[in-house]
Image (cartoon, rainbow, N blue to C red):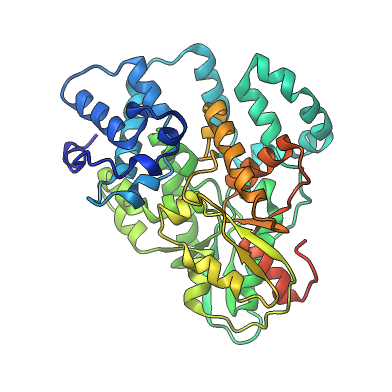
Amino acid sequence: MDPKLINDCVHCGFCLPSCPTYVLWGEEMDSPRGRIHLMKQHVEGTPLTPEMAGHFDACLGCMSCVSACPSGVRYDRLIEQTRAEVEQVHVRKPDDRALRALVFQLFPYPRRLRAMRLPLRLSAGLRRAIAPRLERINPSLAAMADLAPPAAAREELPRVLPARGPRRATVGMLTGCVQGEFFPQVNAATARVLSMEGCDVVIPPSQGCCGALSLHSGQERQALRFAKRTISTFERAGVDTIVVNAAGCGSTMKDYAEILEAEGGEWADRARAIRVADLAEYLAALGPVAERHPLPLTVAYHDACHLAHAQGIRSEPRRLLEGVPGLVLKEIAESAICCGSAGTYNLFQPQAARDLGDRKAERVLATGADLLVSANPGCTMQIASAIRRRGDAPIPVAHTAQVLDASLRGLTEVP
């Protein structure tokens, strides 16, 4: 924990109404400034108690406070440093250790996720049926069973998808872990949209996890290992720009140079040599050339926290959606408040995540939209799960790329 970053906080309280856990519980130690006070205590010699660890664990890492802070406090770096410290010195209960071991030996590994596809497809109805009973036994396992989406058909992507028409750029594309295995249709749509907008799209087949899930949960060594492998993979692919369609992944990859700085050597410099851009950010800067066909839809757009707060990307996806003829864009109330997904948060803190998911679902449904658009796979699973629990008529959830893909291909609906 960096004392200089801690001392940047003047405890003004502007962060309080932006913090999801403070909104839920009104507890000072579950606000950003409260957690910074605990960090300061630990840096000055107070041992890390289970109670302190609990307040740090309860943070979603959504970065809403970073957007709200008038003093520019780097809470994002502070909570990452703090979680790494917690994982090193805090002794967790056996069931908590087992759950975390399961998560970090499964989700960052695409091949292991791929092995789950058939069981997930076969067990969809059973998982929904046993979730309430499992909730009483182990809420985290119940959340895992409920969150998993229906297994989508695999869509094989070529190593290079050439530009349609005159080539305007060459980009690499991150396929990701959860995105690649649970939402392959999003990656396929992303590649097609980039191609139709004049990009040669390079898709390295040897990709792995970018390290986002690990970094945000204090698994620092694993995160650094994944970061180095990702850098090497795209260096070998010969691209200097990587387009990312998952908010959490893009946020972490943009910070590669900073998190690798402590490693010394060349890794930070190699990270700086690669530009990382979110899909909406990249397309908005590139400008449209492909014809948009009408899509008569009312769409509610959800701000993923690691897109809006961590990357500052809010207007670009809205501009892209508003550029589709016939599409009407609706805003969601409390758009800055996290949906409760936050990477692995909905597995490790299932009750708080459930409360935030229910709150978000209520506000999404209040828009009356035909379709919810999200730019992060965790948000998609979290909000879809919350809407199912309400028993209301389901609202389909799609990625920005899928809406653009449908419009560019002249489809009458988003597949």
Count of marks, rendered view: 0
**Farthest-out residue, bottom:** 166
- Along the viewing direction, whichever of 225 and 130 lies nearer the viewer: 130
Which residue is depicted at the point 30% across and 31% down? Answer: 35
Image point (40%, 40%), residue name: 19
Residue 97, x across and y down, in percent: 50, 19
Quadrant in which residue 36 is drawn: top left
Task: Name the quadrant of the C terminus.
Answer: bottom right
Front in this rendered view, residue 48 or 242: 48
Quadrant containing the N terminus is: top left
Is 64 displayed left or right of 125 in the figure?
left
Residue nearest the viewer, comparing 41 with 202: 41
33 over 270 or under it: above or below: above
Q: Position of residue 255 (x, y in %)?
A: 36, 52
Residue 116 seen: no
Residue 359 at least partly seen: yes
Q: Is residue 180 left or right of residue 31?
A: right
Instruction: Pinpoint residue 166: horizontal percent, then vertical percent.
Output: 60, 87
Q: Residue 192: where, in percent of width, then height?
A: 67, 70
Q: Front-most of 15 and 290?
A: 15
Q: Residue at x 47, y 32 (%)?
A: 24
Along the horizontal axis of the image, is 224 left or right of 197?
left
